[in-house]
Amino acid sequence: MLEKNEIGALILRVTLGALFLIHGLVKVQGGIENIVGWFESIGLPGFLAYGVALLEIAGGIALIIGLATRLVSALFALLMIGATVKVKLAVGLLGNGQMAGYELDLAFLAIAIYLVINGSKLLSVSQLIFKRDSNSFSKAV
């Protein structure tokens, strides 16, 4: 019998993965050089744009299929903290009319932290490959 928590974690994992995948694809399809320039304009090294896009695409796919859920979610949490502090905090929770605020970043951060803590083994490639309890981290803590 499936537990409600496992179903909920699956929904969160696939949703977060799909949203990050879409964000990464938009960065690449819209011209990654534009993102490089924007990173540089806010004081970040331009090459980070490639890393962020790669993380969003590869990490999004990994979450959708359930591969390295905790690791990818931790990386996404760090990304959301960085985006919030470096870019979004100044425009406020709901934005300033020209730029979105950090409300979505907080939601992504909360989901990522939930997945780091609880994992998600239902329909997970990691579960199939390693045939172990993906919740061993939370049991050890």
Image (tube, helix red, strand yellow):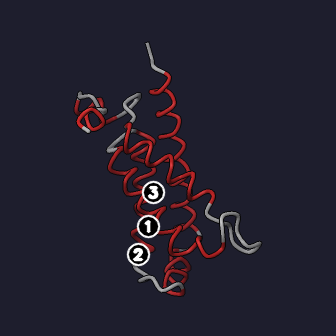
The residue carrying mark 2 is 48
* Quarter that holds the C terminus: top left
The answer to whether 13 is drawn above or below residue 47 in the figure is above
What residue is at 49 percent from the left and 61 percent from the top?
80
Spatial CA distance of label 3 from label 1 is 9 Å
Identify the mark at residue 52; answer none if there is no mark: 1
- Rendered position, 37 above or below 125: below
Q: Residues within 10 Å of mark 3 (few under 14, many from 20)?
A: many
Q: Residues within 10 Å of mark 2 (few under 14, many from 20)?
A: some
Quadrant of res 134: top left
Q: Is residue 109 left or right of residue 138?
A: right
Report the amino acid beneath label 3. Ile
Nearer-N-terminus badge (2/3)? 2
- Residue 57, disc: 3
Picture layout, residue 100 above or below residue 136? below
Q: Are marks 1 and 2 in contact (CB under 8 Å)?
A: yes
Q: Is residue 85 above or below residue 67?
A: below
Q: Could you tell which of marks 3 and 1 lies nearer the N-terminus?
A: 1
Q: Nearer the viewer, mark 2 or mark 3?
A: 2
Q: Is residue 114 left or right of residue 84?
A: left
